[in-house]
Image (cartoon, rainbow, N blue to C red):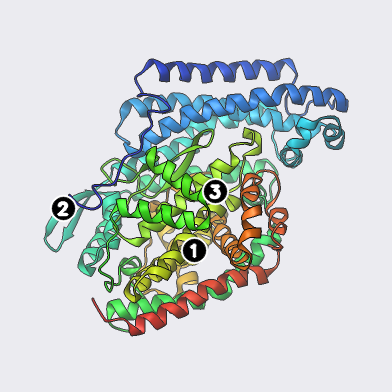
Amino acid sequence: MSVVAEAPRWDLTPFFPALDTSEFRTAFQDVNDRVAKLEQLLDSHDIKIGADQLAPEAAARTFETLVPIWNATSDAYRVVSAFLYGLVTTDSRDEAAQAQLSQMQPIGARLGRLGTRFTGWLGTQDEAGLLQSSQVATAHAYMIQKARISADHLLSGPEEALASELGLTGATAWGKLHGNVSSQLKVRVELPDGAETLPMSAVRNLAYDGREAVREAGYRAELAAWAEQGTVMAACLNGCKGETGLLSRKRGWDSPLDEAIFNANIDRATLDAMLGAARDAFPVFRRYLRAKALRIQGTPGGLKWWNIFAPLGVSERTWPYAEAEVFVERCFRQYSDDLGDFAARSFREQWVDALPRDGKRDGAYCMGFRGDESRIMMNYKPAFGSVSTLAHELGHAYHNVCLAGRTNLQRSTPMTLAETASIFCETIVRQAALAEGTPEDRLEILEASLQGSTQVVVDITSRFLFEDAVFSRRVDRELSAREFDEIMLDAQAQTYGDGLDADARHPAMWAVKPHYYGRGYYNFPYMYGLLFALGLYHRFQQDPDAFRAKYDDLLSATGLANAADLGQRFGIDVRDPEFWSGSLAVIAGEVDQFEATLSAAPTSR
């Protein structure tokens, strides 16, 4: 049995025994009933966009009536929707789950419309008076502050309701189509040992194979497959970005980016400081790419795309999934027993679905279910990169543990801060592996780390530039698959530069990443998460005990303040380019180690 085949599937039975059970049907109906009752409650209190301002005491009584019911309804919805999402992302051919999810989506849209009404009502109230009149409101102060700004960017009540309903047949449907097509796509690959037909997730995993001929075959087959699906993928992306751009303009945002920055709990000064520091650091990443190219390709110049994730072949160690669990738990325990106990619990309770298979979506994610319970999907490979991914997703799950004591309205964490715990846990595991490994092992670990950092800084910037250009051009008309390819290649040229072979880039990355098929600008928060977490890890190294005393509280408060205020808890000014340059300097140090270790390591191609 292969090391990958031993990896487990997750256990969803603690939530529902199966889809076709009375327990699930009862819970599904309960969510529908709760949303209906919540809507009746909002109607009875005249909660709507543009409502009259109440006296602070009256507004406080209304707020205190609504909040507990809102939180309970949202929690119930989360369990049922997460269960369905877990089923369809691990088996998109599960028609029963797909049908139930399509029935769930209108309920979610309805709940979203109620949230918009609630936001619009809060925006008309006396914020200071409400906070002074209610302890419940004080506990939700940041949410109220954001609601006041959000209310200034709402359409009328009927228009917002219509936009929500149309979204189910608009961007939501386009995103679903992308996910279904990409997960069910079968690709013929001309491998050295003969042609095989594989699911797209398996084809993309060929990028990690030890043989360059296999990697190149996977790359070329993947590009051909995306080209065949170009019309469908372009329609999906045009639909998603067209809807986002239109609604953003109608709601009075200067651009979709301004809306995304607001939703990310940062400001333009923070984004500019981070992106500027990243641009200044591109030459460091290009050094890494060229050094890897010289080792793998044997000639100076840029790395070919199919070699980005290539193993260097100097370490003989493989990482069976069972060993990854043991190693991650031990590393977590070196930080704290609480973190180690958490990892042990997640493995014991089978939170992880690790096995790549037909119908399962590519990539990895963690989703909160109920209370402090989460589930993790990944596509495990027997290499250190997947060990790092496991630690990353467990970091998200630990973040959910820290948030469990907060109400649903207090747990709303933007992506900029949602990556904090995941990157921090990844760093813990990497540093332990570097300390314990042989020189050959350390080279593999540094390579995995720099692969990830390059993706999060350089490739993320290329995705940001791509998305920025698409939003700008999509205002006037739809774009073709060829145009999307051209924009992507230009973005890669601006970021990777001579670190990549100009004739072997990846024009179809816009079709690969499911994140593009959401509301927009999914990308920069990942860079924020990496560099902010590296800054936090530096603080941990300086004073471990003081850091531990604050860290869990920081994670529990990520929905209670903006990113700048939370950074100040550790003396971090996220509007200062020097902070981001300092975090990037940590990566530059890894590049120095990589080049030195690579020059001393035996050549193996």
Give the secondary structure at mark 1. Answer: helix
Residue linked to disc 3: 520
Residue linked to disc 2: 196
Give the secondary structure at mark 2. Answer: strand
Query: Can you say whether 65 is above or below 78 in the image?
Result: above
Q: How many marks?
A: 3
Q: Amino acid at mark 1?
A: Ser
> Is 32 on the left-hand or right-hand side of 152?
left
Q: Which is nearer the eye, 446 or 274?
A: 446
CB-based contact (under 8 Å), mark 1 and mark 3: no
- Image quarter where the C terminus lies is bottom left
Query: Can you say whether 124 is above or below 362 in the image?
Result: above
Q: Is residue 70 visible?
A: yes
Residue linked to disc 1: 462
The residues bearing labels 2 and 3 have C-alpha atoms spaced at a distance of 35 Å
Locate residue 400, reporting x and y percent.
54, 42
> Is 256 on the left-hand or right-hand side of 224?
right
Residue at the farthest left position = 194
The residues bearing labels 2 and 1 have C-alpha atoms spaced at a distance of 32 Å
Q: Which is nearer the eye, 492 or 191?
A: 191
Residue appearing at x 40%, y 65% in the figure: 433
